[in-house]
Amino acid sequence: MNFLEFRGKIFDLACFNIYQVYALQADFDRNNLTRWTKKGFLVRLRQGYFAFPEYRSKPGYALYFANRIYRPSYISLHAALSLYGMIPEAVMQITSVTPLKTTSFANDFGEYAYHSIKESLMFGYELKPTADNRAIQLATPEKALLDLLYLYPLYDSRQELEELRLDESYLHNNLNRDLLANYCAKFQSKALAHRVKLLFSAYDLRYSLNR
């Protein structure tokens, strides 16, 4: 199978792994992928995962690939907060959480960081459609904020939380505090509950986690 035949059969997947290629042709020579990558016909995303370079110009695919190259996972933490406009800084990494081990990858589509979390905490994300009917697994604003406070114990003082520079208009007008409280209870973490209370105090958010 030459590259044009290969591309015609698998291009619509956007990204793919070696096992999907073997399902297509059991005796496929995987050295072809190395050769085609060196020629610029393919982009290596991580070991065993590839994409077509044409997708670099398509919006949303850097995020879509974050879900695909390390599964299960969903985009959360700083990347999600930035997408919602809750933090002012541009985020260089696409950050996700996963029940797998913590790891990171860098490729032509961006830098990807995955933070390990208990499998029982893999909730609170939604499927966000892309322009061409794919879907991105993205934490809700409330879960992204809780994941951040849970995984980054440095946010354990009013000063550190203020230095996050969260958008106060969003916190007061858009954040679902009932949902945040419900999610917080599911963590069963006194440390997280303490940080959430500090957050509410730092940004003058009135709510009781115990109601």
Image: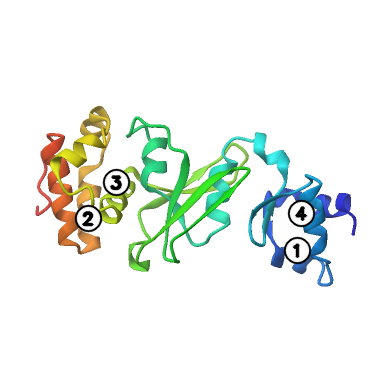
Kind of residue indicated by mark 3: Leu
> Are the residues flagged by discs 1 and 4 in contact, CB closer than 8 Å?
yes
Label 3 packing within 10 angstroms: few (<14), some (14-19), many (20+): many
- Label 1 – label 3 distance at C-alpha: 38 Å
- Label 4 – label 3 distance at C-alpha: 37 Å
Reading the image, the residue beneath label 3 is 145
* Nearer to us in this view, 26 or 173: 26
**Above or below for 165 versus 199:** above
Label 1 packing within 10 angstroms: few (<14), some (14-19), many (20+): some
- Label 2 – label 3 distance at C-alpha: 10 Å
Estimate the x, y position of residue 164 in percent, counting from the top left.
26, 37
Kind of residue indicated by mark 4: Ile
Reading the image, the residue beneath label 2 is 184
> Looking at the rendering, which quadrant does residue 47 occupy?
bottom right
Please state which of the two labelled residues, at mark 2 or mark 3, is closer to the viewer: 3
Reading the image, the residue beneath label 4 is 10
Estimate the x, y position of residue 32 in percent, counting from the top left.
83, 59
- Label 4 – label 2 distance at C-alpha: 42 Å
Q: Earlier in the sequence, mark 1 or mark 4?
A: 4
Quadrant placement of the N terminus? bottom right
Q: Earlier in the sequence, mark 1 or mark 2?
A: 1
Q: Could you tell me which residue is drawn at 34 percent across and 30 percent down?
A: 88
Q: Label 3: state its secondary structure.
A: helix
Q: Label 1: state its secondary structure.
A: helix
Label 2 packing within 10 angstroms: few (<14), some (14-19), many (20+): many
Estimate the x, y position of residue 134 in percent, counting from the top left.
59, 46
Q: Is residue 138 left or right of residue 197?
A: right
Q: Earlier in the sequence, mark 4 or mark 2?
A: 4
- Label 1 – label 4 distance at C-alpha: 8 Å
Q: Could you tell me which residue is drawn at 42 percent across and 65 percent down?
A: 99
Kind of residue indicated by mark 1: Val
Reading the image, the residue beneath label 1 is 21
